Amino acid sequence: MKALFIGGTGTISTAITKRLLAEGCELYLLNRGNRNGALPEGARILQADINDEAKVAELIRDLEFDVVADFIAFVPSQLERDYRLFNGKTKQFIFISSASAYQTPLSDYRITEGTPLSNPYWEYSRNKIACEEYLIKQYRDNGFPITIVRPSHTYDERSIPLGVHGKKGTWQVAKRMLQNKPVIIHGDGTSLWTMTHNSDFAKGFIGLMGNLHAIGESVHITSDETVTWNQIYEAIADALGVKLRAVHVSSEFLAACGQVDYRGGLLGDKANSVVFDNSKLKRLVPDFVATTRLDQGIRQTVRYILDHPEHQVEDPEFDLWCDRVIGALDAALSAVRE
């Protein structure tokens, strides 16, 4: 198989890239070269900014592909550019959308690919929906061979998967746990969630590549494991070898506090209970099964981050914000009890 990835070094795409190279795929990566150092040998690098359309067109002038996948497109204009560049040059174009595009709030917590797309809380998700609509039109009107993939919360060894964190990542929450400080869990922590290790995501994604039955289809790729946010935070604390001190805070209150875009990230995504039905993926990729249980994946991630200090990015602003939110709740409780 001859494939081109736009990006190829992010959380979702890295595992796919490594697995394809191990399998002997003729894989091209089109990116700016900032994170290619950690890749195994074998990738053919086309170094360019995808937004420099003229340069990219020149780089691929004599190339054609079985699969082109764009991991870094977020708005329709970027897909319009991709269509100009790759129409007639690939047998399959895969767009990485988002499961956050599904109906929010949900009318049924069980999500299939037939669940409506609508998210009034998060512009990111609405842009992904608009991207999908553009590609579907190109498929219907011009035969552009699309496949739309919707990941949900996918993680790797470089970042601990969490619900409430600051702008600089999730390490500060782990550090609070290690310091025996309270950590914030949105809602009451009992809403249902699904997290998928990127190695499992890669299995499903590769099964869709070059799959003639996936053309014109939208497919989400997630684990079948469903857990609560309380279980997620307990698993992180257990991996760190500490006792969890949880403070549950309303998602609406967190969104109003505005440290980061919790309106989108929580109200438009993580605050909602979701259970994904992967029947469609398993029809298209019959041997797909997610094998990394959440507690196992979190232990791997925590071990990796503790061994690699470069991933322990401090976020003192978020740390102070957590103290202020928790202090405000304590003060409100004291005032009510007086």
Image: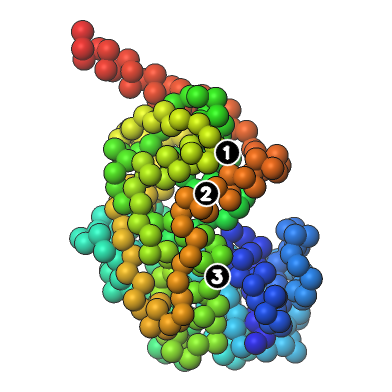
Crowding near pointer 3: few (<14 within 10 Å), some, many (20+)? many
Image coordinates of residue 79 in percent, x first then y, are: 53, 73
Q: Which mark is residue 202?
A: 3
The residue at the point 70 percent across, 71 percent down is 30
- Mark found first going from the N terminus, 1 or 3: 1
Depth check, mark 3 against mark 2: the one in front is 2
Residue 3 lies in what quarter of the image?
Answer: bottom right
Left or right, residue 50 beside residue 12: right
How much space separates mark 1 and mark 2, taking CA atoms? Answer: 13 Å
Badge 1 amino acid: Trp
- Mark found first going from the N terminus, 3 or 2: 3
Task: Give the vertical position of 176 relative to 27 (above or below).
Answer: above
Looking at the image, the residue that sits furthest to the top is 338
The residue at the point 61 percent across, 66 percent down is 15
Task: Give the vertical position of 94 relative to 88 (above or below).
Answer: above
| Quadrant placement of the N terminus | bottom right
Depth check, mark 1 against mark 2: the one in front is 2
Image coordinates of residue 159 in percent, x first then y, are: 58, 48
Crowding near pointer 1: few (<14 within 10 Å), some, many (20+)? many
Image coordinates of residue 105 in percent, x first then y, are: 26, 55
Q: Which residue is mark 1?
A: 171
Q: Which residue is mark 2?
A: 298
The residue at the point 33 percent across, 32 percent down is 248
